[in-house]
Image (tube, grey):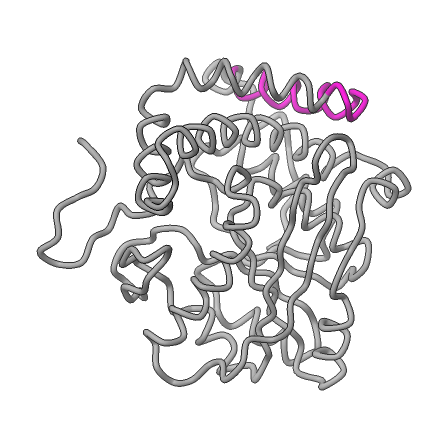
Amino acid sequence: MSETFRPSQFLAPRHWPTWVGLGLVRIGSRLPYRWQLRTARVLGALLYRLLPSRRRIAHINVDLCFPERSAEQRAHIVREAYVSSAMAVFEMGLAWWADDDYLRRLHRVEGMEHLEAALAAGHGAILLGGHYTTIELSGRLMCLHRNDTYPVYKRARNPLYDAAVMAGRLRVYPGILNNLDLRTPVRLLKQGKVVWYAPDQDFGRERSVFAPFFGVPTATLTTTARLARLAGAPVLPFYSERLPGEQGYVIRVGAPLENFPSGDDLADATAINRAIEAQVRRTPEQYLWLHKRFKTRPLGEPPVYPK
């Protein structure tokens, strides 16, 4: 997917709030990293109070996924998730506009040997991502090591935001893949490229099976296994993590999933969820708990979110 961003198309008053938001992202990207962290903590606390409906969703998600933790521990995860989500705004600006040398100093990478070994087999590689709040920046960091990485993207409803995201990402990636298009990623994988896919959102029953995610039956796309089967490509977990204090980030590539795809949609979806869950358990406050991950329920089961 390749498009030209034309700001003149978005001058109507309805786009002005989005322009203000994008301007603040650009300004925020210029702040020293320590001030980004501190500002995110203030903004996160503010948003926690200002967005009660999202707060309820986050509490429900965390309660479902961590029943073994105390109420106080779960509440702490939710509060920190707001801070992490606020920091993600600054990380979006870093992903689009920060200098390569600055970002090289701000992160380290682990497990790149797994990706290099997989690519040496000649069938490309699928990076299995998740909606960690560091998702935007992690792609930029990966491209510092592999500039042949193509992310899969679901278009946003806000046309200006969608155009700005596309423009920002096309500064980083050689191309963007539409989540509804299987043909192009298969072709790229057969050419030995890297495709980055994060399937952990609720897209309804179509192309999904109900596989456990933290023990909860969850609508899980079967697209990852289908891509791997059509291209003959291995699937490697791709994790990103914001380190404590001002240490920056680590991006981590895991070993290829074993016996994947197996031909069993439920088994494959379970393996996908298990891999994503592993990183969420490492840093639960850095996962995107604010969306309705469990919106679609198995037939006969009641909804988990209030209307």
Q: Residue at x 17, y 44 (%)?
A: 303
Residue 264 versus residue 270 in the image, above or below: below
Q: Nearer the viewer, residue 131 or 38?
A: 38
Q: Residue 122: percent from the left, percent from the top?
A: 71, 84
Q: Nearer the viewer, residue 136 or 85?
A: 85
Q: Which quadrant is the C terminus positioned in? A: top left
Q: Is residue 61 left or right of residue 141?
A: left
221 is within the stretch colored magenta: no
Residue 96 versus residue 278 in the image, above or below: above
Q: Residue 41: percent from the left, percent from the top?
A: 60, 20
Quadrant housing residue 72 = top left
Q: Residue at x 48, y 69 (%)?
A: 182
Q: Residue 8: percent from the left, percent from the top?
A: 62, 25
Q: Is residue 115 left or right of residue 184?
A: right
Residue 154 versus residue 223 in the image, above or below: above
Residue situated furthest left in the rendering: 300
Q: Which quadrant is the N terminus positioned in? A: bottom right
Which residues lie in the magenta part? 17-35
Q: Residue 261: percent from the left, percent from the top?
A: 46, 81
Q: Residue at x 54, y 81 (%)?
A: 258
Dominant secondary structure of the residues highlighted in magenta in the image:
helix
Q: Residue at x 37, y 39 (%)?
A: 62
Q: Is residue 94 left or right of residue 231?
A: right
